[in-house]
Structure formats: structure tokens, C-alpha cells
Amino acid sequence: EVQLLESGGGLVQPGGSLRLSCAASGFTFSGYLMSWVRQAPGKGLEWVSSISGSGSSTFYADSVKGRFTISRDNSKNTLNLQMDSLRAEDTAIYYCAKAIRGSSSESDYWGQGTLVTVSS
Amino acid sequence: QSALTQPRSVSGSPGQSVTISCTGISSDVGGYNYVSWYQQHPGKAPKLMIYDVSKRPSGVPDRFSGSKSANTASLTISGLQAEDEADYYCCSDAGTYVVFGGGTKLTVL
């Protein structure tokens, strides 16, 4: 059974940093592109970043480029998102999601999300 | 990286059919056959309902169908049921990025 469990969310001041993690199980982690998608309170879904199965290719939304860094540890089946220079508009639930096949942008499994609140 | 355009809300009675549109541009919806649709109930994670424009993951009822014409994709739900009431999001690959629609709230009357 595929499971994705996010952690690392919390309250952080503007300008601060936070590192999210997603522990994956139930599938061959290194074989799939993984993504982070966020949802601000009462708002829609917003793609944040994706990383290829090997970790060699990364992709970012313009809204987070230069501030967020996606990475993965295939030996530990873990996906990470380092978030720096956080802004109030980064407040959201952050979901990790697994590609439906290798390098697809479409995600068939999602975690339950972790809440990030950026506020002073 | 502009969001895809979806109607804010649609509604239908049980047993009826509804269609939700999703309009993009030639560099996202129009340029790729990687359009997906997600259902989200309040407080829950999104659930994949349609991928590759018209394919259904296992377990998704065949009442859900997808299509695409030029820069507009559509999700049709036939035989509406109460449990279909949810938010629906379209999503498209755009090469080096991914773009979601703003979401459509489906109300089952």
C-alpha cells in the first residue's frame, strides 16, 4: 500500500526557514517523480516543485524559485522541501504527491499534508 | 505560469450530468495530453479522478469522463450522486512546470 507522510510544518516568522519532509513507502521510490503541491487556506491547489526519480532534474514554480529547494534521499525513501525567505503568502497546507508513472506530472497518491504558517 | 480557467461553481440534481471546463493555452492544455482532474472533499487530500485527458485510475467510477479540444479540457460527471459534491481541479503539464485550475465547486442539489 502506497503511503506518503509529510512532516516538518509549523509556525515560522517572515524571513525564516523551514524544512518539510515526506516519508514514502509501498512503492519503488526512486522510480517516480515526486512533487510538492500547496493549498493556501480557503484557496485552490498550487504546484510548488517537482523532482525526477534520480534527483537529477528539479522544477519550480516562479513563486518559489530561488527560495525553495527540493531534494530527495532515495536510500531513505524521503522527499524534502527546504523553504527559505518565507513570506506570509507561503502559508498553506503542503502536500507531497507521487507521479502516476515514472516522470509524469500527474499524481496518483497524495499525503495528508502538513500546515505551514508564516506569521509574526 | 498562469492558472487554468475553471468555472467557480456548477450544480446539478442527482442523476443528471454536469460538465466542468478547464481552459488553458497552447503551451499547457493545448500542447500536452497530460491533463488530469482531482476531486477534493473538505479537509481531505486531493484524489486523482482522470489522467492523460481521459483515463480513469482503477477504482474511479466510469461516471467520470474526460476530454480535450484544443486549449480546453472537460470533466463530465454523469449520473450525479450526493458524494460527488466536492471541489474539482484540473491540472496540466506545461513542460518545465505544472499548472492547476482555480477549482470548481460542484453542488449536488
Image (cartoon, coloured by chain):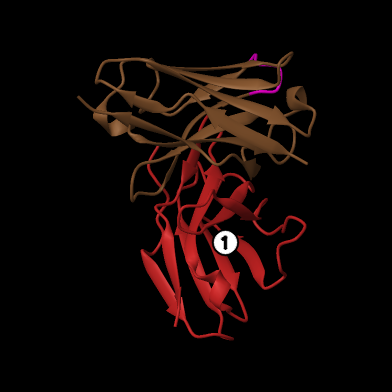
Chain colours: A brown, B red
- x and y, in percent, of residue B55 in the image: 72, 57
- x and y, in percent, of residue B77 in the image: 59, 73
Q: Is residue A107 visible?
A: no
Q: Is residue A41 visible?
A: yes
Q: Nearer the viewer, residue A118 or A56?
A: A118
On-image quarter of the N terminus of chain A: top right
The residue under the point 55% across, 42% down is A112
Chain identifier of the residue bearing label 1 in the image: B
Is residue B103 found left or right of A5 in the rendered image? left
The residue under the point 50% across, 70% down is B85
* Other-residue count near label 1 (Cα within 10 Å), few / some / many at <14 / 14–19 / ≥20: few
Q: Secondary structure at mark 1?
A: strand
Is residue A77 found left or right of B102 in the rendered image? right
Would you say the magenta stretch is mainly helix, strand or loop?
A: loop
Q: Which residue is mark 1?
A: B69
Is residue B96 found left or right of A14 in the rendered image? right
Q: Quadrant of residue B73?
A: bottom right
- x and y, in percent, of residue B96 in the image: 53, 29
On-image quarter of the C terminus of chain A: top left
Q: Answer whether residue A55 is magenta in the image.
A: yes
The residue under the point 35% across, 49% down is A43
**Residue segment shown in magenta:** A52-56
- x and y, in percent, of residue B95 in the image: 56, 33
Above or below, A106 against B70 in this view is above
Above or below, B10 against B27 in this view is below
Q: Nearer the viewer, residue B80 or A21?
A: A21
Above or below, A3 against B43 in this view is above
The residue under the point 62% across, 81% down is B79
Disc 1 residue type (three-letter): Ser
